[in-house]
Amino acid sequence: MMKIRLSRVLLAAAALAAAPTAPADVSPVGRWKVMSDRTNRPVAIMQVFERDGEYGGFIERILEQPEDAAVSICERCPGELRGQPIEGLVIMHGLRRSAGGFSGGHILDPDSGHYYRVRMSVDPEGQTLKVRGYLGISLLGRTQTWYRLD
């Protein structure tokens, strides 16, 4: 009876050791098509970058421009970001590798002007990026799925 339990434990340990690499091993650096979590339509192209072990991102291009604006301006952004063009705006910063992905940073919602805590995870193939912005605890937030363009 003890040998059967021990062999099951060893078998489970071997299966875990042979599992595919964790998503945190895949880099999020590159260009991503941002999908709205509300409409499931593409809204922007984001460029995720890495500098000195920290990850961030800027809006490369807005895909859905408001009809009344040739260039969208961040009217609700805080401080020196107010009045800046949204295209080229660094809205995500301070993420570092963590268990299961990247966390510890902040992301700006240019529509509301609010900063949120952020975490992200890349699928094992590196083709989708789950980006979750939240207040306080991760349960109080929302997730967008971004698709790699590179």
Image: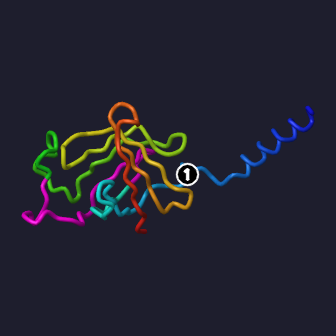
What's under tag 1, amino acid-wise?
Pro
- Residue 4 x/y as whole percent: 90, 38
Q: Position of residue 138 (x, y in %)?
A: 40, 36
Is 88 inside the magenta-drawn segment?
no
* Quadrant in the rendering for residue 79: top left
Where disc 1 sits, the SS reads helix
Residue beneath the point at 40% across and 56% down: 145
Q: Residues within 10 Å of mark 1 (few under 14, many from 20)?
A: many
Task: Please identify the quarter of the rendering in which residue 142 is found.
Answer: top left
Q: Which residues are magenta?
A: 49-73
Number of dots carrying numbers: 1
- Residue shown at the point (40%, 36%) measured from the top left: 139
Is residue 83 found left or right of 24 in the rendered image?
left
Q: Is residue 65 above or below residue 134?
A: below
Q: Which quarter of the picture shows residue 93?
A: top left
Position of 83 with respect to 103 (left or right) is: left
User: Is residue 51 depicted above or below 150 in this figure?
Assistant: above
Residue in the picture at 35% in, 31% down: 136
Name the quadrant of the C terminus: bottom left
Q: Is residue 17 left or right of residue 4?
A: left
Figure quadrant of the N terminus: top right
Q: Is residue 24 left or right of residue 47?
A: right
